[in-house]
Amino acid sequence: MKVPLLDLKCQYATIKEEILRVTEEIFESQYFILGPWVESLEKDIAGYCSSRHAVGVSSGTDALLISLMAADIGPGDTVITSPYTFFATAGSIVRTGARPVFADIDPETYNISPENIERVIGAMTGEEKACLKAIIPVHLYGQCVDMEPILEIAEKHNLFVIEDAAQAIGAEYGKRRAGSMGHFGCFSFFPSKNLGAFGDGGVVTTNSDEWYEKLRKLRAHGSHPKYYHQIIGGNFRLDAIQAAVVSIKLKYLDQWTRGRQENADKYRMLFSEAGLDATTNLPIEKENRHIYNQFVIRLAEKRDALRLFLQNEKIGTEVYYPVPLHLQQCFSYLNYQEGDFPVSEYAAHHTLALPIYPELTDDQQRHVVEKIKAFYY
Ligand SMILES: *Cc1c(COP(=O)(O)O)cnc(C)c1O
């Protein structure tokens, strides 16, 4: 039995008619960039994410970049983030000319730990503190960071909070939605995210009218009106086709999220029945509404051998992420060493993402668990 890590064809089959209808409409209109489809999606996303505004952009990476630009972060500034995340989080910081400063993660959620942020800031000189401008918490795998203490730290040190919610659309922290708690919320419509486009796309949410206007300007080369530039932006525009596809999918997002949550529950039951609880260290839900972009287990032993074994059994898995950012070659100038962030380093060597997409069948899930059992026993 084949169990891919993600099967987008299944999902497409259920919405094909709607998609083809709207794409034909767009082709007939020949209106491809921004415009009514993007505006309509922005309203829907703002509502879904409990934010006042949303600005459609060209990718999740650009959502991060444009938020940093809106916050005027640049050369000489530093930004605290997690070393255990997708590259774009730290890559965007560097692209503004600023410098990332890492703080290690919580071993249970894999999210940046507020205590470690405090420790990192506590060790800074007065001069270094003056350079610190923002924190980018990353809601990894679909579970929110412990935000309350981070918002307090940010308030105390006068820092921007830019949520990297690329993996967490609809995730909740108490009653608050991912992307609505900081100054900016950054989302990605990369096809493998829970709400994916048919190409690249993203969105920034904000509760501030002022930042909203600035984001809209930055998205179109900083111009307002057209051809009059007060600030320097870029081409961060979202295509109408991507907006229309995402708008259609948004109607089904809660249903798909429930499917992922039910699959997570089923894995818990199956792993427990198989006597594998202690071996597989299943995800811990500390914050409410985990949306399971990924279902990540942690294996004390033989992670890579298990992955190879499952691959030979046609079961797709992935390692998110094999090299923590402080050990990436391109960041060697930051002078971090192996051992600086032991929790992230351990996670990089011991975690494995299993298939969790909503259309996964009962038989497929049982098969995954049976094969993992066969490997360890
Ligand atoms: C996917 C992702 C991004 C980047 O999104 P793109 O749309 O691929 O540019 C940024 N941060 C995290 C945590 C992500 O998972």
Image: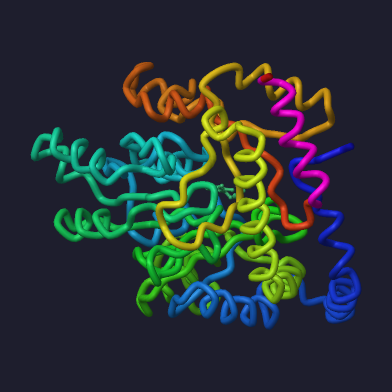
Q: Is residue 288 above or below residue 283?
A: below
Residue at 56% from the left image edge and 54% from the top image edge? 60
Residue in the foreground of this view, choosing between 263 and 210: 263
Pick the quarter of the image with the C terminus.
Answer: top right
Pick the quarter of the image with the N terminus.
Answer: top right
Q: Position of residue 209 (x, y in %)?
A: 38, 79
* Residue 369 belongs to the span the image colors magenta: yes
Quarter occupied by residue 148 = bottom left
* Residue 61 belongs to the span the image colors magenta: no
- Residue 182 visible in the shown view: yes
Q: Which residues are magenta?
A: 361-376
Q: Position of residue 23 (x, y in %)?
A: 85, 73
Residue at 40% from the left image edge and 63% from the top image edge? 173
Q: Is residue 47 above or below residue 65?
A: below
Q: Position of residue 65 (x, y in %)?
A: 47, 52
Residue in the foreground of this view, choosing between 100 and 279: 279
Q: How is the image coloured?
A: rainbow
Residue at 62% from the left image edge and 51% from the top image edge? 264
